Amino acid sequence: METFGAIVNQYSTETVLGGGINPVWTEKHGNKLTIPVPMHVTYFTVKLLDKDILATEMIGSELFYLDTIDEEKAKSEAGYNVELHLLDTYNIPAGVLNFTVQRDMDNKLVITINHAHDLTDMDNKLQEVADAKRDPTVYISIIVAVILLFHCWCGILYHHRRMVVD
């Protein structure tokens, strides 16, 4: 895994180059997201992406419900700390994203993406999925076909020799 981007609804951080499975976001990655929260919104979708040169894959996502925020802590200087357990598209655990939630003077949420840990390595995962999709019967079929061709070829040679000798 080379780079990571965290997305909360349509707000996103910059990528973390070479973050590995335990990336850390800082101010240079735009890790503070200020999000206005309309009254009807009850949750945000949080996604973590693995960005490669050729493609961007989602490592995992999860819903973050606003009613889980300790408002007293969110209004403090330290903020409210969250460990969000992410799931991949197959609902398999994909790692944990740590962020801090604060409320600013305008009652907007300020989400500071801190770090992630135990993330799924997408390069290995894609290989595992490809391996799982391989059907061993394909190899067996190819082997059987090669053996049959060999026997047919030997049979033709045998009959050809027999015709020449007789």
Image (spheres, rainbow, N blue to C red):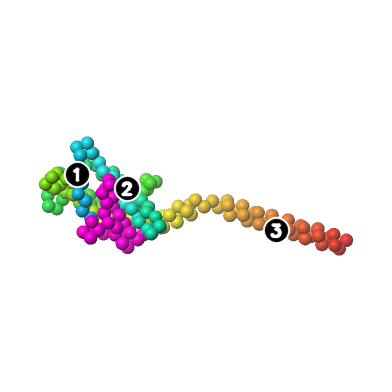
Residue drawn at (14%, 53%), measured in percent from left and top? 78
Please provide percent x and percent y for residue 51.
Answer: 35, 56
Q: Quadrant of residue 27?
A: bottom left
Q: Circle 2 sits on which residue?
A: 61
Q: CA distance from mark 3 to mark 2?
A: 53 Å
On whether residue 3 falls in the magenta region, the answer is yes
Please provide percent x and percent y for residue 18.
Answer: 32, 63
Horizontal side of residue 46 vs 146, given as left or right: left
10 Å crowding of disc 2: few (<14), some (14-19), many (20+) = many
Q: Quadrant of residue 72?
A: top left
Residue drawn at (27%, 45%), measured in percent from left and top? 9
State the residue in front, 53 or 119.
53
Please provide percent x and percent y for residue 94.
Answer: 34, 51
State the residue in front, 94 or 40.
40
Disc 1 residue type (three-letter): Pro
Disc 3 residue type (three-letter): Phe
Q: Main secondary structure of the magenta part?
A: loop
Question: Secondary structure under badge 3?
Answer: helix
10 Å crowding of disc 1: few (<14), some (14-19), many (20+) = few
Question: Secondary structure under badge 2?
Answer: strand
Span of residues in magenta:
1-30
Residue drawn at (35%, 61%), measured in percent from left and top? 2
On whether residue 19 falls in the magenta region, the answer is yes
Q: Which of the marked residues, 1 or 3, is nearer the chain's N terminus?
A: 1
- In this view of the protein, can residue 120 be seen by the observer? no
State the residue in front, 153 or 14.
14
Vertical comparison of 127 with 104: above or below: below
